[in-house]
Amino acid sequence: MKLLNKTIYLPTIVIVSIFFLMGNPALAENCVQERKTPQAPQDIYKQANPKGTPEDIAAGEQLYAKGAKPLACVQCHGVTGKGDGKMAMGMKPKPRDFSCQAMMKDIPDGQLFWVIKNGSKGTGMMGFKTLSDDRIWQVVSYIRKFSN
């Protein structure tokens, strides 16, 4: 019986260990969230974020955590950006998971800017038209930290 257990369990332990040590790309892909949000206009979609200094990122963090009005980003997107904030419970679709590298690498800064400014129809994401463009870019800079 011991020989049978070693034969069955040892390969399983090795495979599980490899996934933990190297990461499992298949599992990482599971965090990708499908959205039907329209693409931003081309001139915005292709824009690179002009705000990337450590000061900009710190300002973006402050806005994300409590400064954005009428509702701070953290309330829906959570402290770690996983879309698990206090207000996320029951939201369909779930708020965007900014920590998902597989998804965030394909969303240009200009698209993030446009969604923050205008919201995303069919989701709980409201537009933040009261934030200046500079402030929105700072939030984009901070959001990028979750998937790096």
Image (cartoon, rainbow, N blue to C red):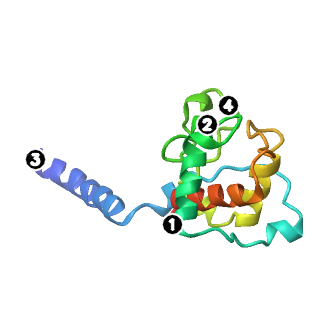
Q: Residues within 10 Å of mark 2 (few under 14, many from 20)?
A: many
Name the element at disc 3. Answer: helix
Residue 89 position, x and y percent, is 59, 28
| Residue located at (81% from left, 67% from top) | 45
> What amino acid is at disc 2?
Cys
Disc 4 vs disc 2: Cβ atoms closer than 8 Å?
yes
For residue 54, which numbered disc appears in the image? 1
Q: Residues within 10 Å of mark 1 (few under 14, many from 20)?
A: few
**Of the residues tagged 4 and 1, which is closer to the observer?**
1
Residue 78 in the image, given as x and y percentages of width and height: 53, 40
Image: 98 above or below 89: below
First in residue order: circle 4 vs circle 3: 3
Label 3: few (<14), some (14–19) or many (≥20) C-alpha neighbours in 10 Å: few
Residues at marks 4 and 2, CA–CA distance in whole angstroms: 9 Å
Question: Residue 60, position in %: x, y?
Answer: 59, 54
Kindly identify the amino acid type of the residue bearing the numbered disc 1: Pro
Q: In the rendered structure, which amino acid carries the disc numbered 3?
A: Lys
Which dot marks residue 76?
2
Q: Is residue 36 visible?
A: no
Q: Are marks 4 and 3 in contact (CB under 8 Å)?
A: no
The quarter in which the N terminus is drawn is top left
Whole-number angstrom distance, CA of label 1 to CA of label 3: 57 Å
Badge 4 element: loop
Residue 26 makes an appearance in the image: yes
Which sits earlier in the primary sequence, circle 2 or circle 3? 3
Q: Which residue is mark 3?
A: 2
N-terminal-most mark, 4 or 1: 1
CA–CA distance between discs 2 and 1?
A: 24 Å
Residue indicated by mark 4: 91
